[in-house]
Image: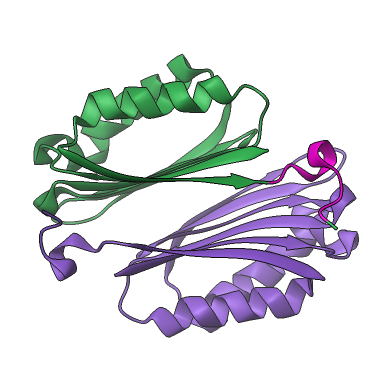
Chain colours: A purple, B green
Amino acid sequence: MALHVVADFYGVKPDILKRVEDLKPKIDEIINRSGLKSIKDVWHQFEPHGVSCVYLLRESHVSLHTWPEDGYVAIDLYYCGKEQKRVLDAYEMLYELFKPSKVIKNVITRPVPSEDGSPN
Amino acid sequence: MALHVVADFYGVKPDILKRVEDLKPKIDEIINRSGLKSIKDVWHQFEPHGVSCVYLLRESHVSLHTWPEDGYVAIDLYYCGKEQKRVLDAYEMLYELFKPSKVIKNVITRPVPSEDGSPN
């Protein structure tokens, strides 16, 4: 099964959430260290502050959307590969980076059809 | 609240799922017709076939990942704007395009902190 972690982080210090140039090197490093295989990443700077990004992976995607004024980050880690430890490691590194005071986390299992067989 | 539709479409005819050049014009049109505001989109062609894409929106993102050999598409529509009809319209248009024989759909509500007030 593929793993889709949908996580809302609250109580994050705003400074790290404001600008692409501050956040991107840290997220790049987390993606690399986790072993997730990024194909392309796309970032957007909102004004006066706030960032959205998506990493398209060989095995689905990772996205972050930040609301610095509220200390909030919406995170998705959707991973259809076989090395699920990588996505759990990436999640832990994001948690360490953002140090949220509160988390709402949903983990959805989604199919990898060729691996799981027919859904019917 | 923001709306995150997580949908797995099964039983889709494979031809439309194989190549970026076939799928991208159709998804571009759906995004435009729905009124969702795309900032950037990023596409990847897998070989021998299969496609991943993400549209970064002003209001979060839309992603698709296809497995043509299994007639399967994994769809995410995550929308933090006020015009939720747009995301429901986009979903309906995707349904019409792909005509799945089976759907597994989860709708997650996520916060828009400034609008919803403090989560604490």
Q: Quadrant of the N terminus of chain A?
A: bottom left
Residue at the extreme top of the image, as rendered: B33
- Relative to A64, is B114 above or below? above
Numbered range of the magenta stretch = B111-119
Q: Is residue B86 visible?
A: yes
Question: Considering depth in this image, is A74 or B47 the residue closer to the camera?
Answer: A74
- For the point 39% across and 29% down, the residue is B91
- Relative to A65, is A37 above or below? below
Residue A9 rendering spot, x and y as whole percentages? 72, 63
Q: Is residue B19 left or right of residue B13?
A: right
Question: Considering depth in this image, is A1 or A48 the residue closer to the camera?
Answer: A1
Q: Is residue B42 left or right of residue A11?
A: left
The answer to which image quadrant residue A6 occupies is bottom right
The answer to whether residue B112 is magenta is yes
Q: Is residue B53 left or right of residue A28?
A: left
Residue A37 rendering spot, x and y as whole percentages? 42, 71
Question: Considering depth in this image, is B112 or A28 the residue closer to the camera?
Answer: B112
Residue at the extreme front of the image, as rendered: B120
The answer to whether residue B116 is magenta is yes
- For the point 26% across and 33% down, the residue is B23
- For the point 61% across and 69% down, the residue is A28
- Relative to B106, is B25 above or below? above
Residue A90 rendering spot, x and y as whole percentages? 56, 77
